Structures are given as C-alpha cells and as structure tokens.
Amino acid sequence: MKRMTGAEVRQSFLDFFASKEHVIVPSAPLVPVGDPTLLLTNAGMNQFKNIFLNLEEPRYPRVADAQKCMRVSGHLNDLEEVGPSPYHHTFFEMMGNWSFGDYYKKEAITWAWELLTQVWGMEKERLWATIFEDDEGNLPTDEEARGYWHTETDVNPEQVLPFGRKDNFWSMGATGPCGPCSEVHYDRGPEYCDKQHVEGHVCGVNGDCARYLEVWNLVFIQYNRDADGILTELPAKHIDTGLGLDRVTALAQGAKANYDTDLFAPILRRVQEMLGHDDKTMQEQIIPYRVIADHGRAVTFLVGDGVIPGNEGRNYVLRMILRRAARFGRKLGFTEPFLGEVAKTVIGMFGDHYDDLRRRQEFILNVIRQEEERFQRTLDVGLSLLDEIMAGLEDRGEAVVPGADAFRLYDTFGFPLDLTRDVAAERGFGVDEAGFRAALEEQRQRGREAQQFATVDAEEFELYARLLEELKESGRLGPDGVEHPYDEYVELETVIVAILRDGETVKHASEGDEVEIVLAATPFYVESGGQVSDTGLLARYQEGEETPSWEVEVSKMRQPVPGLILHEGLVTHGELHVDDPAWAMVDTMRRMDIARNHTATHLLHSELRYILGEHVQQAGSLVAPDRLRFDFTHGAMLTQDELDAVEQSVNDAILANYPLLAEHEGYQEAVAAGAMALFGEKYGDEVRVIKIGVPHDPFSQELCGGTHVHHTGEIGLFRIVSEGSVGAGVRRIEAVTGRAAQQLVQQRLGVLDAAAAQLGSQPEEVDRAVLRLLGDLHRGQKEIGDLRRELARLEFEKLLGQVQEVDGVKVLAARVHAADVETLREMTDWLRTRLGSVIIVLGAIINEKPSFVAAVTPDLVDQGLKAGTVIQRVARVVGGGGGGRPTLAQAGGRDPRRLDEALALVPKVVRDLLDGRESS
Ligand SMILES: [Zn+2]
Ligand SMILES: [Zn+2]
C-alpha cells in the first residue's frame, strides 16, 4: 500500500469522494446537537440520524466527511483497554460517505474498491469482502451486494464471504432503519496473528486474532423495522459507510499499532522529550505513554468542543479521562502539570484540518491546566487520607483497606482503584476490591435511576417522531414540519393540527385540561442557545364576539424532534378542537425583555473581549426576561475597575443606538469574516449572523438564532449585579437591562432616600453621614469600654476594703456582679493574688439564681478551712449545695433573696471551723 501521512489519508478520502460529486461537510461537534438521547457523538451517522428517520430533508443527496467521535461509556473497566490494546481509542476519526436516497450498493462497492486499490494501492490479494447471509433464515441473502463484488470489482471471488446478523446486519435501534452490511477486511499476514500458540486456532476474517483487520463497513439502509419486528423495504434507500482513520493510517505506514503512526507518535515523542527518557525507558513504560497519547487527544478535542470538566454526563467523562492521563503522567515521573504541552502538540497535529482547535487554543490550554492543578490538590488530600486510613488499620492490626474507603477515595477524590491499590501495596496493604466493586455497582445503580443525560427518552422520541410523520402524511404539516417564523412575528393566525393530553393525541380539550398543542405555524421561540422559550396565549376569536371561544395559556415550549413544536399550557376557557383556527400570541412585553437581555449579552461578550482580551470565550449563557447570565473563560476574578469599565462600555454602546442586522451567510464565510461561532451549535451551510454596529464594519458579530432588539438604544440601562467563579477558569457575570435595571435602580434609590431621611442628610451625602455616624459610634464604644474598665477597678477596690479578720485569718465575703460562674472564679483568682493568705467567698445572682465560688489559700486549708465545706454550709441558706476541691469550690442555690444573708454567715462558719467546731 502507498505510504501516506494521516492527514494525507484523510484528505485523499475526501478528495476522492468530492470527485464522485459528494459535498464535503465538516465534522459535527463532539457534543451532539439537537439529540438529547446521546451523551457524545459516537458514530459518523449521528449527525444524519434525522435524515434516516425521515424527520429531516437531506440538504444534499450525497456527502462525505471525517467525523470526530468519542466512545466512552463512563465505566472504569472500558478505559482499562486503552493503552494495552494497539487500536482501542476513546477519541477517533471516522471517515464516511453517504447517500440519502441517491446512489446505492453498486456505487458504494465500486468506489470503495477503487479508493482502496487504485488510489491507496492496497494489494488486492490481501483484501477480503463480506456480505450478509441470514443465519436466522428469515431475510434474503444479499445477492445484490455479492453480485457487484463479482462484476464491478476484481476481488478474488474466493475472498467474498457471507456472514450473519452479528457481523453483517446493522440497526439503529430496536425499531427504525436497518439493513445488511458489506465489509472489507485486510489481511496483514500470518506474522500478525497473536493466537499462533493457541491450540486449534485458525486465522480468519471476523476471527479472534489480529491478522485480519476490518477496514471499511458499508451499510445499506434498506428496511424499516416496526414495533412488531416486521421489516418493510424503505422507499428511499440510503448508504452509510465508515472507515477509521487511525486504522487505515496504520496500514499505510506499516505500523503494528496505531500509536506508531503520525496520528499519535508526535505526542509520545513530546512526552518522552519532557521526561528526558531514552527509547528503552519509554518502551518499558509504553502503556502509560499510550494512555497519555490517547487521552490527551480526547481531552483536547472535547475541550475544543466546549466541554468543561465536571461531575455529570459528558463533563464527567472529560474529568475522568483527563485525571486518568494526569495520573499516568505521575507514574512516569511528572511532578508538574504537563497535559497542556500534550494539548499543544495535539493542536499542532490536528489544527490544520480542525481549525477550531487553533482558534480556541488558549481556552483549551486554560481549562486543561486548571483541571490538572485541581486534580493535583485533591490527589494530595486523598493521599494523606489514605495514609490516615492505613495508620488506623495498622493500629488495629489489620492489613486490608476496606472497599468502602477505597470507594470513598474514588468517588470524592477521583482516586481510581489501581492508584489506591498501588499506594497501599507500597506499604504492604491490600485493598478489598470486591467491596469496592460492590460500592461502585451500588452507585451505578443509583446513577441509572437518575439518568442525567437524556431529557427525552427514546420512547418519547419515537412517539413524537411518529406523530410528526402522521401530520406530514395527512398534509396538516408541510415537509419541513411546523412553520416557525419567530423572528418575524410575535403573533399570527394559524390552525391547531394536534392536541395531546397525558402524552396521547386527543380530538379536543376543554377548560382545566393540561395540554400540548401543535400548530401549523408558530411565532413562539423555543429555548435554544441560552435564550428561554416564549410564553403567551392561544385563542380563537369569532366574528362579532368580544371574548374568545376558547383560550390556552402557554407556559412552556418544546421541540422533542426537529420540526415538531409543542405549546404546553392550560386551557383556561372554552373547548378547542383539532383543525380549529387559532391566534398564537407571544407575551410581547416579556419577549421585549428577553430581546434586550439577548442583545446586551452580545454587547457584553464583545466588550469583555475588548477589555480583558481575546482569550475570552463564551462558555454558556442564559437569556431570561428578568436577567442575563454570561459565562466566559478568564483566569482571574474581575477587579472593580474592570467591571466598571465593562459596564460603562456596554452602556456606551447602548447609547450609541447601533442598528442590529440579522444576515444569513455561509458558515465558512461568516467565521472567516470574524463572526464568533459558539460551542454546541450545529451549523448548516447557511447560518444566521447577528451584527451590531455600522453594517459594513460591525463591532460585534455572532452566529445566533435568538431574538434581538432593532437598535441597541432599546435596551435602556445595563447594570451588572454580580461576578463570580463557576469552575476551572470560567467566570460568570449576571446583569439586568431595561425594565429590570430600572426597577433595580428605583429600588436602590428608594433605599438611599429613606436612609438619607433617617440620617437627616441629603441622599448624595449619605455616605459621609454614615461615616460620621460610624465615627461617633466608635468613639462611644471606646468610651463605654473605658468606663466599664474603670467600674471594674472601683468594684475591685471596694472588695479589697471589705476584707475582715476572723481569728487572725483574712476573710472576704462579698456580693458581686458577674455574668457567669467562670467570671466569679476569675475574680477570686485576682483577689487571691492581691491578698495573699485569705479565704474568699463571692456570691452573685446568675440567671436569677444565687451562685457562689469559694477559694482558700493552701496555708489556710492546712488549718482546717476547706473551700468545699465552707461553701456547702453557706449555700444551705439559699436552699442549695455544692462542692469542689479544698482550695476552690462552687455552689448554687434556689432563693436569690437570701444571698446576702448567706454571705453574712461566712465569718461565723470560718470561726467555727478554726475552732474545730461544727457550725449550725
Ligand atoms: Zn490468527
Ligand atoms: Zn445570541
């Protein structure tokens, strides 16, 4: 076979099909657009699914592309294949050619053979073809395909083999499009067999050894399968083919593993260079090297398509593989973040074909660096936690880390099991892996119950797809489905074509019913690109009548399948029927509020890039009637000066009253002219560009399908209400415009006026008045503090004056003010230091109860004066008791009125004790 680089393989594939009159379309993003049933794009056909389901008209009859794909189910085990296996990848490119009701088996087979043998120069004798022969005996053998292999190609007829359903029949799902396949396999030669030593092994196509490689799969979408499993021939048959770029490139470069091709090798070399490893060291650790190469590619492309690390769905997939790569890097000896360098290499390798990668380079590197740093921090915390766990085990004489702990490390700190295992083993500990897997399974179970990805399940999708089909067949809807001129109208006259109640179509509905209504046309915007749906009314007005004969309040909009738009709402009045004429009226005040916020979002985006720099990329947005939220990439918190400058510039752009222009242009031209393309939108060849500013030199142009004001002046006032972080390198600004901004200002000014009135000052002097007040308050507090201290000193002096002598012993019994017993005790301490040899009994009312503390210096204890004894006798007077050590004791009582009486008893108690008598 001809020697080619990976890029040459890709380009020659596309060129070949362009020469066969195919339109070359760009890869769809990895984040599937308009398909809520799918986590990540995982096959070339994803972006054409709706054409196969007959939901969407194809734009061109034949296309070809190279599609970015990710295959990760989110399960730990699947990833363990990556690295050891020479051709199992998370990210890969799938090349494919497609016919939508245009050419069929003959051309697909002829062209595949032509490209493989004539353009790429694959040796004919090494190529094998397969066709479908039903092993269940129900479907006819694909003689048509076999015939074309024999008549249209010069493949050795002996090398065309039949296979059954497992290998050669394709279906999209349990129902829907399906059909036979024909594959091409490449025989790499007996030396590639990795089962030579297995007894009884025979190499074969679709066998279990590495000798034969499946190169190309041609799918003939021939049937539709209904719910009863019955297949019917499709009126328009399609071609869907796929061949992996990595695999063909490996053949073109005679590489044993995909990692040895130029689609991976530069990454491995860069890692080797950073580590300073020689070739031998690298080969010894080739598995971690490969994991980093595979995951590094995947991570770069995922972030390039706008995925940010997180804990759910595709965000979690990204976090998991990024952390896995970081951890393998640590194994190899990296101590600092290195994945940014890997990503740079990937961008260098793929940026020519996928130019988005270049445009978003700074964003990609930022996101990766921040996540890698975050992982290093949690890794350190996790490692010390594991240390603690093992120390605890050691104390108890155990040697196995419990599964629950291993799982907690995995779940909370992103510690994969093998890391825990490694670290534990270093210290001679084992890990309860069965326990870990049980805990993991339990969590998966919970995860399955709360499936986060899918907002529309497959069943619902089918229900609505069928409804759309019926509406088209009955002529109630045109071939494009519901007409949707939301950017031209806010109300229009139309017809009800379907009513649904509890997910079932009904002929009519009446007052109090919750319904979903399909109209032939609607001006209601359906949530998309961050802008929320419109709300409003549907009603029927009849000649000469004041009130409508029925009315529906629309609270929610949905488009479960392309072309089918649902108005969800409540029938507030009357009875409506299918085929009724209807006025569809958007709540225009609300629509205007939304439009103000949407246009302001574009202005904000453009001013942020102007003030903070071109690295600012939109990472998400919400455009609602009461506020707007804009997430963007930026590494640091915005300073007050920056926020002020952004706010000022947006308001300047509003006051300049620039016109807005919505233009339809080709995607490539629009992006080339500087229009900002955002993440997660699928662009047809024609896109809508919103331009703000003078038409020939707009200062803002974004690809956008939303609704906008006509001139920026309509926005009124723009006011930022908050700025904060929402994750690795992503900041969020929330702002208000128009009516909400006015309300905010009004309310703030109202508060200011009220404060001014209370301060007896003018509103513009409130800050100074408050400062003055705070100064006064501060001085007053200081004065109070001084006075308190003085008071305490005086009371202390007074106490010292109350000392009496009883038989030559100093006795102090006094009532004091104290908030708690602790204070009482402290007071006895101070007094004792001042008085030397002494017995002190202090009493106070605390929480409305009498409390006492008695302290006796040790010399007096020797004379028979024990604090506990003294205080017990004193407390008896107030109906209480207590005790403590000989030098310090405390007591409480019930009767606060007799506190003084109790204290007066102290001298007598002392005298009695000194005399060795029991006092009464
Ligand atoms: Zn073999
Ligand atoms: Zn927009």
Image (cartoon, rainbow, N blue to C red):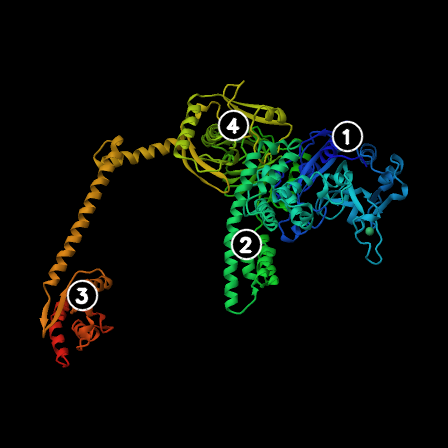
State the image coordinates of residue 578 (x, y, percent, origin top left): 59, 36
Looking at the picture, which amino acid does disc 3 mark? Answer: Arg
Q: Nearer the viewer, mark 3 or mark 4?
A: 3
Label 4 sits on residue: 543
From where the camera sits, is residue 370 visible?
yes
Please tell me in which quadrant of the rendered image residue 10 appears.
top right
Type of the residue with mark 2: Asp
| Circle 1/circle 3 CB separation < 8 Å | no
Is 407 located above or below residue 562 in the figure?
Answer: below
Tell me if residue 521 comes above or below residue 399 in the rendering.
above
For the point 57% across and 58% down, the residue is 423
Residue type of the residue flagged with mark 1: Phe
Q: Is mark 4 within 8 Å of ligand 2?
A: no
Tag shown at residue 832: 3
Q: CA distance from mark 3 to mark 4?
A: 102 Å
Of 882 and 337, nearer the camera is 337
Residue 805, disc: none
Q: CA distance from mark 2 to mark 4?
A: 66 Å
| For discs 4 and 1, the disc positioned in front in the rendered view | 1
Q: Which mark is residue 411?
A: 2
Q: Earlier in the sequence, mark 2 or mark 1?
A: 1
Distance, label 2 to label 1, CA atoms, is 49 Å
